[in-house]
Image (spheres, rainbow, N blue to C red):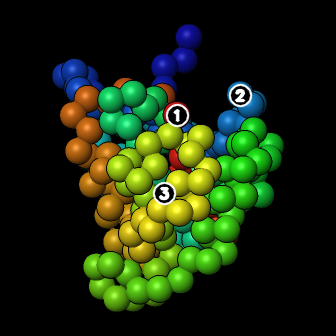
């Protein structure tokens, strides 16, 4: 049996852990590499995840719509590029709503006035990814990549207890961070 690598902090037990599988996308359960070579899977505490993920998100140039996860119940948080919406089984109305938001994404970052490439949609605005009409209508908050990355990591860090079995890194030109 092969055990995945884990950060040193998890050895002492931790209330927050995630399996970071940065470059692999699961489409209906089947792994698809999104970068070659793909980085290996690692189990990490929040600090170790944020140390890798936040700078990578901040350096990204793609457009991202990110949905705040339900901290009580989510078990996966992953990026899905626009071209994979269908293959991943995203409902057509939801995919269409997200694509429209990505196409219309423009304006200043809420934190620094730089050009926004992210929309952050809070749980208050959209509490379930079935809510296509709310995805279309909710204003969300616009961020540049740096502040979008900070917002996403802040939200993950506010979850007191987490055991996420799948978190990935963005790939492709535009897409969505979704939770299950
Ligand atoms: Zn750690
Ligand atoms: Zn900004």
| Residue drawn at 62 percent across, 77 percent down | 104
Residue 66: mark in rendering:
3
The reply to whether discs 1 and 2 touch (Cβ–Cβ < 8 Å) is no
Which residue matches tag 2?
29
What is the distance, in whole Å, between disc 1 and disc 3 at their CAs?
Answer: 13 Å
x, y percentage for residue 4? 48, 26
Local SS, label 3: strand
The reply to whether discs 1 and 3 touch (Cβ–Cβ < 8 Å) is no
Circle 3 crowding by C-alpha within 10 Å: few under 14, some 14–19, many from 20:
many
The N terminus - image quarter: top right
Which residue matches tag 1?
180
Q: Earlier in the sequence, mark 1 or mark 2?
A: 2
Q: Is residue 14 left or right of residue 95?
A: left
x, y percentage for residue 164? 42, 31
What is the distance, in whole Å, between disc 2 and disc 3 at their CAs?
Answer: 22 Å
Q: Quadrant of residue 27?
A: top right
- Mark 2 beta carbon near ligand 1 (under 8 Å): no
Local SS, label 1: loop
User: Which one is in front in this view, the residue at disc 2 or the one at disc 3?
Assistant: 3
């Amino acid at each position: 049996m092969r055990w995945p690598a884990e950060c040193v902090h998890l050895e002492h037990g931790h209330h927050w852990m995630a399996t970071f599988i940065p470059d692999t996308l699961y489409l209906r359960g089947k792994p698809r590499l999104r970068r070659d070579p793909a980085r290996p899977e690692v189990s990490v505490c929040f600090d170790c995840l944020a140390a890798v993920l936040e700078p990578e998100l901040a350096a990204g140039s793609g457009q991202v719509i990110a949905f705040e996860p339900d901290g009580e119940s989510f078990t996966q948080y992953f990026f899905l590029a626009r071209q994979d919406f269908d293959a991943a089984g995203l409902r057509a109305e939801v995919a269409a709503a997200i694509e429209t938001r990505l196409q219309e994404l423009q304006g200043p970052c809420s934190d620094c006035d730089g050009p926004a490439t992210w929309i952050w949609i809070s749980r208050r605005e959209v509490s379930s990814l079935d809510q296509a009409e709310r995805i279309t209508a909710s204003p969300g908050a616009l961020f540049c990549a740096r502040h979008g990355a900070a917002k996403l990591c802040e939200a993950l860090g506010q979850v007191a207890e987490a055991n996420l079995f799948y978190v990935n890194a963005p790939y492709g030109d535009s897409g969505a961070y979704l939770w299950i």
